[in-house]
Image (spheres, coloured by chain):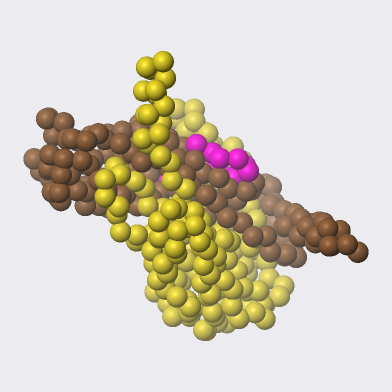
Amino acid sequence: MKYIFTLLFAFLSIPAFASVTVTPVHLNIQHGERSTFLQIQNPADHSATLDLRVFEWFGQNADGEDLLEKTDNVILSRPVVIVPANSTTTVRLIVHKRSGKSEDSYRVLVDDITPNKQGIGMTLKVNSVLPFFILNTSNSSGVLEKVGQSEFKNTGDRHVRITYTFTSASGDKIVRHRYLMPGQSIKLDSQNVDDIVWSDSVF
Amino acid sequence: MKLKQKLLAAAAVLTALSLSTAAQAGSAAGTVTITGTAVVSCTLTSPTVDFGATVPVARGQQTKQFTVDIDCPTGTTWSLGSLATLTNITIGGAAGNSALVQNAAGTGAIAGASQIAGTGTGVPQSQTLTMRLLGNATGLVGTGAIVGSVPITLTY
């Protein structure tokens, strides 16, 4: 019985925290629309402070890291929001300027900057990085073509999202996701790639 | 039509719209017609990582494994990463300590090409990670409770 109480105490003393949730995680503005919105839900019993930023997105490097630049093409209705405990709030994203391209690509960064609570150990602060696409035509598409033995290129005029899996040297199945903007290509080690799935949908 | 029937009809339409944006398999050229917008969100649940009330006498680096649960709808792609950037951690009121999140084995960062990635299945997917506490050149600083937070990024 003593051990049961000890175990019960151990579980109770290490609570799990659900992160702030952003909805949707794939943002888009269709041709003819001027704005969209992001819902932020805070399931915690204390308020959350979030810092929102929008960057122009030029694709990803070989390691999958985003290539970003500051922009004022998109306006956020509130760049910093405080979401009360167990509450939901909405932030609007408004198009200020469109390019002449079929699709404009952005990343929306949602950083949790809530001040630390004292006396509760080490916690994670979950930041979100969301894709945000603005479609400037009604009939564009991304097209993935194989252009070499292990090279794939987006020959369309909209982004393509690729998911591929490969087996590591230790035998583990590894999953990777990559975005290819129009005209961009990716070289994969085809000997190790087990499967490739791609889509140009914006959900 | 009763309200319940209307709601069921609306749900059926939304489901059809969300299913109409199917992924393309293989490397052949193809297009996807956008006919609807599915509202998708994911939840990450993480524990408080407890290093105990006091810093061990040795004051060396401290590591602890923990598990996070990522709950995404089926087909939603996600990547989990943590920059090598360290955060000030307070121990017994003393700053000057730092922390980072590493892979399950505690052997490397989960940044760039080493990010952990997956595709949502509709049920929570568990990932084991390691939190590492570091101090300054002489080790951890302070003598009291270990308190702080480390940023982690969920990329879609």
Position of residue A182 in the picture relative to residue B145 (left or right): right
Q: Position of residue A152 (x, y in %)?
A: 58, 53
| Above or below: residue A165 compared with residue A89 | above
Whether residue A191 can be seen here: yes
Position of residue A88 in the picture relative to residue B137 (left or right): right
Q: Residue at x 40, y 48 (%)?
A: B81
Position of residue A38 in the picture relative to residue A19 (left or right): right
Q: Which chain: brown?
A: B
Q: Residue furthest right?
A: B1
Q: Residue at x 63, y 43 (%)?
A: B122
Whether residue A132 can be seen here: no
Task: Write the start and end of the magenta stretch as one range.
Answer: B114-126
Q: Quadrant of residue B59?
A: top left
Residue B80 is inside the magenta segment: no
Looking at this view, is A199 or A90 the one in front? Answer: A90
Position of residue A178 in the picture relative to residue B110 (left or right): right
Q: Which chain: yellow?
A: A
Looking at this view, is A23 or A155 the one in front? Answer: A23
Q: Position of residue A54 (x, y in %)?
A: 45, 71
Quadrant containing the N terminus of chain B is bottom right
Q: Position of residue B84 (x, y in %)?
A: 29, 49
Q: Position of residue B72 (x, y in %)?
A: 58, 48
